[in-house]
Image (cartoon, rainbow, N blue to C red):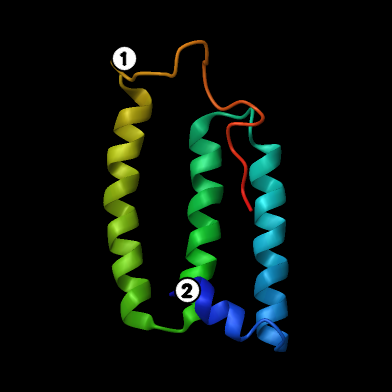
Amino acid sequence: FCVVHLAHRKDTPDGRAAIAELEESITRMKALAEAPIEELWQEDLAFHRRLVVFSGNREFAQLFESCNHRMSVIAKQSFQSPNRRQAPGHSGCRPGLFRPG
């Protein structure tokens, strides 16, 4: 929904600004590929928040924030769990595993 909304407005000043912000966010996420997963998670959340906010739908934005808060709590617990499973041979995010766009 949010991406389609942005695509329909890509040639407007607001649409171009939003796309530029999202591209900057993708660049930051690529730079965070070796960083702790919590840092990447925060940038990923910011990326998706930008999409939702651009939609202009306040109710959807509130629902997004509520769900993200819950997911953040679960994810943070998971990131710190001694039982967290990693892919064999990987100790975290590595180049090539995360390919935005």
Tell how many labels.
2
Quarter of the rendering containing residue 95? top right
Tell whether 62 sits left or right of 95: left
Q: Secondary structure at mark 1?
A: loop
- Residue 90 in the image: x percent, y percent? 52, 16
Q: Taking 95 as reference, is 100 above or below it? A: below
- Residue displayed at 31% across by 14% down: 82
- Residue 1 in the image: x percent, y percent? 43, 75
- Residue 31 in the image: x percent, y percent? 71, 39
Tell whether 92 sits left or right of 68: right
Using the image as rendered, state which of residue 22 and residue 73 is in the foreground: 22
Mark 2 → mark 1, Cα distance in angstroms: 36 Å
- Residue displayed at 51% across by 47% down: 42
Tell whether 50 sits left or right of 31: left
Q: Taking 66 as reference, is 29 above or below it? A: above
Q: Amino acid at mark 2?
A: Cys
Tell whether 90 sits left or right of 27: left
Pointer 2: what residue? 2
The furthest residue to the top: 89
Q: Taking 50 as reference, is 89 above or below it? A: above
- Residue displayed at 35% across by 18% down: 85
In the rendered structure, are the residues bearing label 2 and label 1 in contact, judged by CB atoms less than 8 Å apart? no
Sooner in the amino-acid sequence: mark 2 or mark 1: 2
Pointer 1: what residue? 82
Q: Is residue 62 visible?
A: yes
